[in-house]
Amino acid sequence: AEKILGNRLPDQSVEMLKAKKAGLTAGKDPAGLAAAAVYVASLLHGDNRTQKDFAVAAGVTEVTVRNRYKELAKALDIKIPVK
């Protein structure tokens, strides 16, 4: 996250990870989940970076970010703004 957002790690991404840590992380790569949480938070703040940007920073695939982001959004009932 720091590679992408510097010191501006959105509080929402941290809260997402705390909120679903127990159930959502079972068997999942923590880097992928963290990348997805920061990606979702960045979308909510109007950031236009791509899933690829977050995947590269976290050392995971775009598919991992996409899958974890969908899981997070669904589990936490987060409405992602459509551009």
Image (cartoon, rainbow, N blue to C red):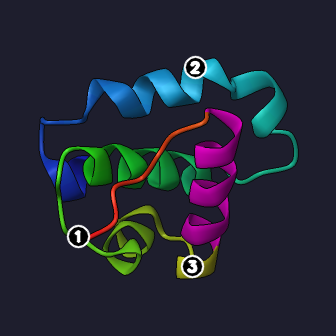
Q: Can residue 23 be seen in this view?
A: yes
- Using a 10 Å C-alpha cutoff, classify the residue at mark 1 as few (fewer than 14 neighbours), some (14 to 19) or many (20 or more): few
Give the amino acid at mark 1: Arg
Type of secondary structure dominating the magenta stretch: helix
Q: In which quarter of the image is the C terminus?
A: bottom left
Picture residue at 61% right of the left edge, 19% below the top: 19
How far is mark 3 from mark 2, CA to CA? Answer: 23 Å
> Relative to residue 15, is residue 27 drawn left or right?
right
Magenta includes 43? no
User: From what the image shows, is residue 43 above or below residue 50?
Assistant: above
Q: Is mark 1 on a helix, strand or loop?
A: loop
Tell me residue 38's x, y (percent). Answer: 38, 47
- Using a 10 Å C-alpha cutoff, classify the residue at mark 3 as few (fewer than 14 neighbours), some (14 to 19) or many (20 or more): some
52, 43: nearer the viewer: 43
Tell me residue 47's x, y (percent). Answer: 17, 58
Magenta includes 65? yes
Give the amino acid at mark 2: Lys
Picture residue at 67% right of the left edge, 46% below the top: 74
Q: What element carries label 2?
A: helix
Number of the label disc, if any, that sits on residue 49:
1
How far is mark 3 from mark 1, CA to CA? Answer: 15 Å
What segment carries the magenta color?
Answer: 64-76
Which numbered disc, 3 or 1, marks the residue closer to the eye?
A: 1
User: From what the image shows, is residue 69 above or below residue 15?
Assistant: below
Which residue is identified by label 2?
18
Which residue is identified by label 3?
61
83, 17: nearer the viewer: 83
Q: What element carries label 3?
A: loop
**Residue 9: which quarter of the image?**
top left
Picture residue at 27% right of the left edge, 50% below the top: 42
Residue contact between numbered discs 3 and 2, judged by CB atoms under 8 Å: no
Picture residue at 53% right of the left edge, 79% below the top: 62
